Amino acid sequence: MERITATYFIETPLEVEKAAAVLAGEQSSGTFVAVPGETDELKQRFAARVESISHQETVTESAIPGARASSGLFHRAMIEVSWSIENFGYNLPVLISTLQGNLYELTQFTGLKLMDLDVPPSFAQHFHGPCFGIEGCRRLTSVADRPLIGTIIKPSIGLSPEQTAALVQTLVGAGIDFIKDDELLSSSANSPFDKRVDAIMRVINDHADKTGKKVMYAFNISDDTDAMLRNYEKIVSAGGTCAMISLNSVGLSGVKKICDQGQLAIHGHRNGWGMLNRHPLLGIEFPAYQKLWRLAGVDQIHVNGIQNKFWESDDSVVRSIEACLKPMLGGYSILPVVSSGQWGGQAPETYRRTQTVDLLYMAGGGIMAHPEGPAGGVVALQQAWQAAVEGLSIEEAAQQYPQFAQSVVKFGKMDKIKNVQ
Amino acid sequence: MERITATYFIETPLEVEKAAAVLAGEQSSGTFVAVPGETDELKQRFAARVESISHQETVTESAIPGARASSGLFHRAMIEVSWSIENFGYNLPVLISTLQGNLYELTQFTGLKLMDLDVPPSFAQHFHGPCFGIEGCRRLTSVADRPLIGTIIKPSIGLSPEQTAALVQTLVGAGIDFIKDDELLSSSANSPFDKRVDAIMRVINDHADKTGKKVMYAFNISDDTDAMLRNYEKIVSAGGTCAMISLNSVGLSGVKKICDQGQLAIHGHRNGWGMLNRHPLLGIEFPAYQKLWRLAGVDQIHVNGIQNKFWESDDSVVRSIEACLKPMLGGYSILPVVSSGQWGGQAPETYRRTQTVDLLYMAGGGIMAHPEGPAGGVVALQQAWQAAVEGLSIEEAAQQYPQFAQSVVKFGKMDKIKNVQ
């Protein structure tokens, strides 16, 4: 029988072997007194199984509070646990409740993070996965062989549909591939959703009629299920190609319902992610997280960026990009969305470390505040990626590409400061 | 204009006032360079506002990693921030993305927890809230003036529908008010959802026909939205009164879609909660969390229990029960579900500290392993609560109530050990 495997990084005041057994028992059938009719065979069939244990360091202070009894030593380990597919069938919420449910409450753990998970081949028959993925997003935006270049409408909230459309006009004229709403905006008092869609799609459709290129705009449809479906239809009927959802705020079942419609690429925003991930020994790591959303059918997912303005390390960002690009069940292609403080100067390092152009590369100020205006900003980002693929350093690229050179002058200083830290 | 207020416990390497301003700016319109047409008036309209700051201690070690620059001192404070309702209208996911979004990523914070939130009166016109609540759950189970007594089917997974129904037969005969699936089980290889509903509802309906009392069974419908709706209809057509959802695994939009159906009481299981809450300076506290689910329409929500088997303190459990019982928008009644290691011995202390019997009080072994069998176990729990309301101590209650006395002999020792800790 096929099994699902989860890898955890744990810390425990107990012997690691004992703690792993508690985890497996608590999350399957193992911890209760036998009831009539409960045979050993049946128990075996549904019991979770500890597959491997890899000891790591022992520390004298617990990562998170809540141990009931302790010798003062806390042991860390990577453990693998597996469950038969018979336990949950093809039910993602129950899978999550099993892999991440009451576990975090157990006094036997003073740290627990879900690092990765593996689902068996039969999942491919029950989850269609992303309807567009990397290839589909390239097709919708007419972009081949380089990252999609994108930006976010700022200020996050406050602009009218007309002001937003005017900004979009500037951006599509500048040659942008992708634009998105901020996650703080769906329908505000002075920017009702439908009016914003109409105003923006008029600009985008006009541009497409003239140039053949349809810029992808990710409208934030996050809301109740019914409202999301209405918003979705509005985008479809206006000729849009993408909807954005705040994954954590809407939740898995709502997101999957939208992905299942299959007519728009789904831009998955991971805001709230820090709550699930920022502590090194609590929550979930991105390799596990992105698999759940690929199964749900999300086409694009945020991965932060190299030298970002948030707390996350470059190593972690690189791991996230690699996780997205690793095929799952033979495909389930998802486009990593790189953002946060990007201006093109990070392109060489991003490419050096990931060796990919299959990215949606987002910049804000790096585009809007370029000395030659947004058109110069978009060209500078394209140049940055051209240079990155050519293996040029920032300095070499600046010598060769004039718009990029202006970015370096304007945005480079801040970046150098960051590099020193 | 009405405003939504959030209270945060923060830790920052900056001056607290500066960090609070960053939070407010990042989560509204404040941090970006002005664009054409963005007036001060408009900015004022959508800007988040720091309402109050209450300084707490300064520490020399950060609660969570990720500060970029630091003097080595980390300041803690409670802060209140407000947003105009005009920013999001009546959209819970966007509210969540605003109150809990990218905040946790900011290097300006080395700790951030959403403690509470307040929504304005107009929310009552847009969210019907729990369709049943405390009064409705009492009516459905014919229980007045005492806690509903409930139990969980164990083992969590592995029993066939027939075995489960046999257990249910024993429990309804014993006088139980409420039974639930474990969160690990929705539809397993040997217990398909529909078959389990049929087998169990046959027993419950028979019992109701004979006695006039319909025991409430919370079937775990957690799944994709469409599957949940199918499962929901199955319960309705079989004469059931309740569906259970794993709130965090399904997510807010999916849960609300189900609550909106209005025919079944919704039992909200909070598994995964520890991930969001166990760290003292990361995530969300229960007073804020339960409000979101009341707005979504959940009728019952887990609060853990006094002297529980998990890591949570009694003080925290008491705060959670109090939070649920505090009216919201003049009502939005939700029934707190007390569980984890309960056997009746915790009833006096639970009542002493909360002064309420508006609870769903769940026990597992405390019912099934009672010396007189499940019937004795249920009676013992009813006696425990009778004694609690009478103000009796455990010892006094044991002298007066024979079945409870047997519980004390059987389960009391473990509890005394816990009390000493």
Image (tube, coloured by chain):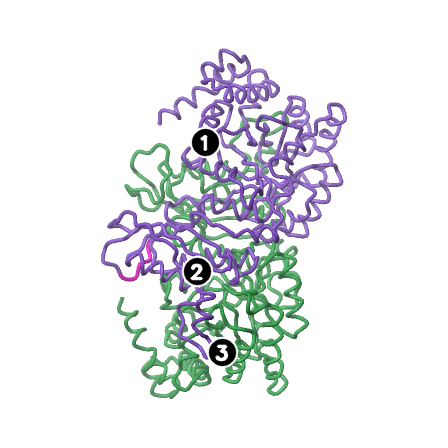
Chain colours: A green, B purple
Q: Which mark is residue A146?
A: 3
Q: Are marks 2 and 1 on the same chain?
A: yes
Sequence-earlier tag: 2 or 1: 2
**Neighbourhood count class around disc 3 (C-alpha, 10 Å): few under 14, some 14–19, many 20 upward:** some
Magenta extent: B65-69
B66 in magenta = yes
Left/right of residue B292 with respect to residue A352 in the rendered view:
right
Whole-number angstrom distance, CA of label 3 to CA of label 1: 55 Å
Q: Where is residue B315 in the image (x, y as percent from the top left)?
A: 41, 34
Q: Where is residue B364 in the image (x, y as percent from the top left)?
A: 55, 28
Q: Mark 1 points at which residue?
A: B308
Whole-number angstrom distance, CA of label 2 to CA of label 3: 28 Å
Left/right of residue B308 with respect to residue A91 in the rendered view:
left
Amino acid, disc 2? Asn
Amino acid, disc 1? Asn
Image mark 3: chain: A
Image mark 1: chain: B
The C terminus of chain B, quarter of image? top left
Q: Which residue is drawn at 39% across and 44% down?
A: A111
Does residue B257 appear in the picture of this structure? yes
Q: Mark 2 points at which residue?
A: B102
Q: Residue A118 carries which label?
A: none
Q: Which residue is drawn at 61% across and 39% down?
A: B133
B280 in magenta = no
Say if mark 2 contacts mark 3, CB within 8 Å.
Answer: no
Q: Residue at x 48, y 32 (%)?
A: B305
Left/right of residue A167 with respect to residue A213 in the rendered view:
left
Q: Residue at x 33, y 59 (%)?
A: B19
